[in-house]
Image: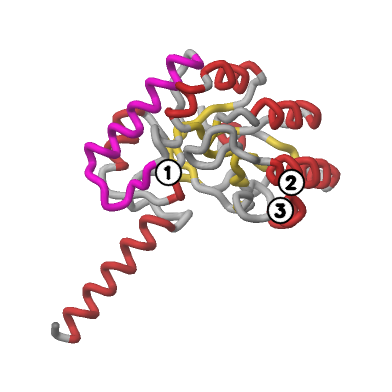
Amino acid sequence: MLPFAGGVIAGLAGTLAWGARSRSSQMFGPSIWHGDRGRRCLALTFDDGPSESTPELLAELDRFKVPATFFCCGVHVRRLPEITRQIIGARHEIGNHSDAHASLWLRSPAFIDQQLATEQESITAAAGSAPKLFRAPYGVRWFGLAAAQARLGLLGVMWGVIGRDWVLDGPAVADRIGRVGDGDIICLHDGRELAPNPDIRNTLAAVRLAVPALLDQGFRFETVSEICQIK
């Protein structure tokens, strides 16, 4: 391969990687990653649920009187429709996290559309209304996503802070999500991909530690739609 050609390919690969993974990228569809930087507000988000542990998390959020946005997977929504309804009943927001938490990169537009559409149908059946927000599994977008989002009326959502609560203990997660600024969107998990009955004790511990500390710092918690003023 000629050096010039190799450089072009490397450059294209780098551009694709940035477009697929960067929190600020709009390459594969409209997306947001923070809210109003002029207000002392935060948005808690939880991916991969609902799970058998979600009601315990809902109880913690109720104790602190803070709302959150839950990016749910269709397989779990169909498995646990009553918990999906509990999320809505507690006045939290539900978003689309694909049907089966499948990676979207290198997938066909038809596959991506099917993943989002099936999830929309599942949430609508369980909760009574269709989501307007979408978060890609692993935070990675790909070709065909923009068309699927447009067809289904979905806005992509990334994050400013991620807790890594699938590998870190509660205090370490709390430390990570404590490093926030005005308007930040925080990513945590009330599930563990497709695992039934997941162990989310570290996530619960992090919420118990971080949320009151952030409230004491004067932060207000809002849903993603509220923090980004999405109608």
Q: Amino acid at mark 1?
A: Ala
Q: Nearer the viewer, mark 3 or mark 2?
A: 3
Say whether residue 179 is visible: no
**Could you tell me how far apart the alpha carbons at marks 3 and 1 are, in whole angstroms?**
24 Å
SS for dot 3: loop
**Could you tell me how far apart the alpha carbons at marks 3 and 2 are, in whole angstroms?**
8 Å
The magenta stretch is 102-127
Is 80 situated above or below 115? above
Where is residue 176 shown, x and y percent of the image?
Answer: 69, 56
Q: Which mark is residue 18?
A: none
**Could you tell me how far apart the alpha carbons at marks 1 and 2 are, in whole angstroms?**
23 Å
In depth, the one of 104 and 26 nearer the eye is 104
Say whether residue 159 is visible: yes
Q: Amino acid at mark 2?
A: Ala
Q: Which mark is residue 206?
A: 2
Q: Earlier in the sequence, mark 3 or mark 1?
A: 1
In depth, the one of 205 and 155 nearer the eye is 205
Q: Residue at x 32, y 51 (%)?
A: 105
The answer to whether 5 appears left or right of 35 in the picture is left
Is 105 situated above or below 201? below
Residue that mark 1 sits on: 136
The answer to whether 201 appears left or right of 213 in the picture is left
> Callout 3 environment at 10 Å: few (<14), some (14 to 19), or many (20+)?
some
Magenta span has 123? yes
Q: Which mark is residue 169?
A: 3
Instruction: Tell me which secondary structure the magenta stretch mostly adopts.
Output: helix
Where is residue 101 shown, x and y percent of the image?
Answer: 42, 40
Q: Residue at x 51, y 27 (%)?
A: 231
